[in-house]
Image: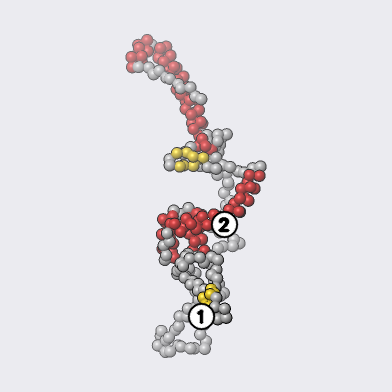
Amino acid sequence: HITPLKVQLPSNEDIHNAYENGEEAVVKMVSSLVDSIQDLLGVNEKLQNQNAKNSSNSSKPPITDGLRKKNRTDSLRKPSGKGNGGQPGHEGNRLEPVSSPDHTVIHEIKRCKQCNASLEQLPDMRYETRQVFDIPIVHIEVTEHKAEVCRCPHCGSHNQAEFPPEVTQPTQYGPNLKSHAVYFNNYHHIPLERTSEIMGDVFGHRISEAVIIEASLECATQVEPANQIIKEQVIASPVVNFDETGIRVKGEVSLKF
């Protein structure tokens, strides 16, 4: 805690009186002002030190940092003397050609560019190759399930083949499409409306928000056993690594656990 400091500055009349009273009065006034300035400098230094403290350079908890962003500190790393970019011997991640491409397009030579002679089906033809890596046009595939229905010619009973357990409705979405919706909405935190929009833009079929919610609940039910095991292991662990770092929620500080 820093006690507020009050400084009494001399008025114009005080300065004039000191001047009239001679050198000793002027020296006394200036000395008083110097003492006040030194006191103010000391208070200012204490305030600066107090303001510079946060959870990274003192014992203050992270929650006291509030909405203020931490100041960047100078790096302790020393220059290595190496140039920018990849170093000699470094295995890069450049696009390498594949030996068995999915599609091959032959660009034929019909005639000579110089004399216009036919160059089709020459025995010494060779090729220069270039490969383009891309994603094929994505579209939804519809699989129709047909269950055979017949009457037994021997006993006359009615018989029908069984549909797969996951096929329960006349029309429904498959697991691959629903898993993409759950992935966008839950893992990447994309809102329901935008997830539905993405599904329409990418796959050409905009699903409803209700379908996304239902798929998320279905996924939650399936992963519940694994989540329960993880929770039990966390509870039994002597260290659970909880973090009390402050985050911004509607402009106010909230704790993150």
Residue at position x 48%, y 22% from top? 3
Is residue 19 among what the camera can see? no
Label 1 vs 2, first from the N-terminus: 1
Q: How is the image coloured?
A: secondary structure
Residue 52 image point, x, y percent: 50, 34
Q: Quadrant of residue 108?
A: bottom left
In this view, 184 is above or below 236: below
* Label 2 crowd bin: few (<14), some (14–19), many (20+), radius 10 Å: few
Residue 68 image point, x, y percent: 47, 38
In this view, 100 is above or below 211: below
Residue 247 image point, x, y percent: 49, 42
Say which residue label 1 marks: 127
Is residue 2 among what the camera can see? yes
Q: Nearer the viewer, residue 117 or 236?
A: 236
Question: Marks 1 and 2: CB-CB under 8 Å?
Answer: no
**Residue 41: which disc?**
none
Q: Nearer the viewer, residue 45 or 179?
A: 179
Q: Secondary structure at mark 2?
A: helix
Residue at position x 52%, y 77% from top? 150
Give amino acid for label 1.
Tyr
Residue at position x 56%, y 59% from top? 86
Give amino acid for label 2.
Gln
83 sits left or right of 117 in the view:
right
Residue at position x 43%, y 64% from top? 202
Residue 80 image point, x, y percent: 58, 51
Q: Secondary structure at mark 1?
A: loop
In which quadrant will I find the C terminus?
Answer: top right
Say which residue label 2 marks: 222
Distance from Cα at disc 1 to Cα at disc 2: 53 Å
**Which residue in the rendered view is the most extreme toward the front?**
155
Q: Nearer the viewer, residue 244 or 221?
A: 221
